[in-house]
Image: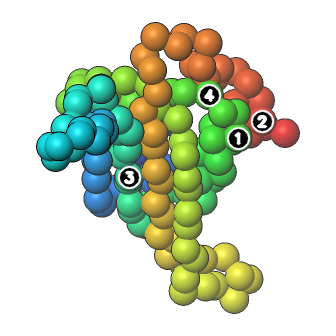
Amino acid sequence: MMMALGLFVFSLPTAAYQDFQRQTAWRHPSSNRVGAGPVRQFVGKGEDTITLSGLIVPELSGKRLSLDALRLMGDSGKAWPLVEGTGRIYGLWVIDNLSETNTLFFKDGAPRRIEFSITLQRVDDSRIELLGNLLETVGGLLR
């Protein structure tokens, strides 16, 4: 297991990511002053974003169904706990964006190579009502 978003596990059999990028911002707005330069004030943490990029080669590793599962999780609008395989807990995250690029097709139109990128946004950890419901998401996959 590389990482888990809720109960979706990023790994070779599902969708392995090759790049992990995290951007964290802090807010320092400026206020103009008379007779002096503007002053900045720290007002708190800003956006926290993680982007995972990877490759699925259905013949060797990964499944197209994995991206469908991630889309259903994103459709729910819920937040999911993000935990690294090492045990590091990142907190609650929503799926902001999922993109895929299909190339090298079989004669039936199925792709041999699927590049994907998923963008996650951190949400306030105290908002328990944002947590995703596994049963609702799995139910959507089975329909």
Which one is in front, 94 or 47?
47
- The residue indicated by pointer 2 is 140
- The residue indicated by pointer 4 is 78
Marks 4 and 1: in contact by CB < 8 Å? no
Left or right of 8: which side holds 12? Answer: left
Place of residue 97 in the rendered image (x, y in percent of width and height, measured from the top left): 55, 53
Outermost residue to the left: 36
Outermost residue to the right: 143
Q: CA distance from mark 2 to mark 4?
A: 14 Å
- The residue indicated by pointer 3 is 51
The residue at 48%/63% (across/down) is 116
Left or right of 1: which side holds 81? Answer: right
- The residue indicated by pointer 1 is 75
Left or right of 101: which side holds 18? Answer: left
The residue at 43%/17% (across/down) is 125
Marks 2 and 1: in contact by CB < 8 Å? yes
Q: Quadrant of residue 70?
A: top right
Counting residues from the start of the chain, the first of labels 1 and 2 encountered is 1
Q: CA distance from mark 4 to mark 3?
A: 18 Å
Q: Amino acid at mark 3?
A: Thr
Which one is in front, 64 or 31?
31
Closer mark to the observer between disc 1 and disc 2: 1
Counting residues from the start of the chain, the first of labels 4 and 3 encountered is 3
Q: Amino acid at mark 4?
A: Lys
Query: Where is 130 relative to 8, above or below?
Result: above
Provide the secondary structure element on which disc 4 rests. Answer: loop
Q: CA distance from mark 1 to mark 4?
A: 8 Å
